[in-house]
Image (cartoon, rainbow, N blue to C red):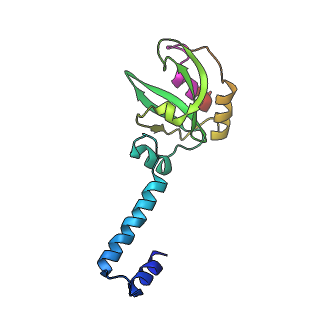
Amino acid sequence: MLHNLFNIIQNNKNYNTSNMEISEFLTRQYLDKFLTESLPTETTPITNAVNKYVSLPKLGDHIITPKTGYFHHGIYVGNETVIHYSGLANGLHSGPIEEISLYNFLQNKKLQIKPHPRRAFSREVSVDRARSRLSEKEYNLIWNNCEHFVYWCIYN
């Protein structure tokens, strides 16, 4: 398409521009269109937008993100959502197992995916197990935390 437009402009006698000027104009137009249609309009970093298309977790992946002083764990359940034990993730009040957006889970922090090559349950069953415990409020920092929850989903 751009090549055809280039030829039309080049062959039209009304334009007094060099091939280089036409090429630069078309390149700028193409890049402007690409950038305005592809990049997010919200304030998320461009790296998050790129990661969204390049490295979204797979269904049932064990995902980890750093928090102040610890790592927070969740299980990716598709559609850019995560099930996690909110526990103390939102302050001093113990929270339930809940489903939230991947964006809220990460809170502009790095995403890590922990591989589990010898899973006891398939990815789909792991997601079902996570959903079966939604709203549970039995968080315990030592015995029943976000990491324990993900391991229960994958291994029992």
Q: Nearer the viewer, residue 75 or 90?
A: 90
| Identity of the residue drawn at 46% across and 33% down | 106
In the image, residue 22 sits, relative to residue 100, either above or below, namely: below
Q: Is residue 104 magenta?
A: no
In the image, residue 85 sits, relative to residue 42, either above or below, namely: above
| Identity of the residue drawn at 43% across and 83% down | 7
Q: Is residue 146 magenta?
A: yes
Instruction: Count the numbered circles shown.
Output: 0
In the picture, measured across the screen, residue 84 lies left or right of residue 114, that is right
Rendered location of residue 133, percent (x, y):
66, 23
User: Toward which corner of the image does residue 27 lie, by quadrant?
Assistant: bottom left
Magenta span: 140-150
Q: Nearer the viewer, residue 20 or 91?
A: 20
Rendered location of residue 25, percent (x, y):
35, 70
User: Toward which corner of the image does residue 107 lie, by quadrant?
Assistant: top left
In the image, residue 2 sits, relative to residue 101, either above or below, namely: below
Rendered location of residue 101, percent (x, y):
55, 34
| Figure quadrant of the C terminus | top right
In the picture, measured across the screen, residue 50 lies left or right of residue 96, that is left
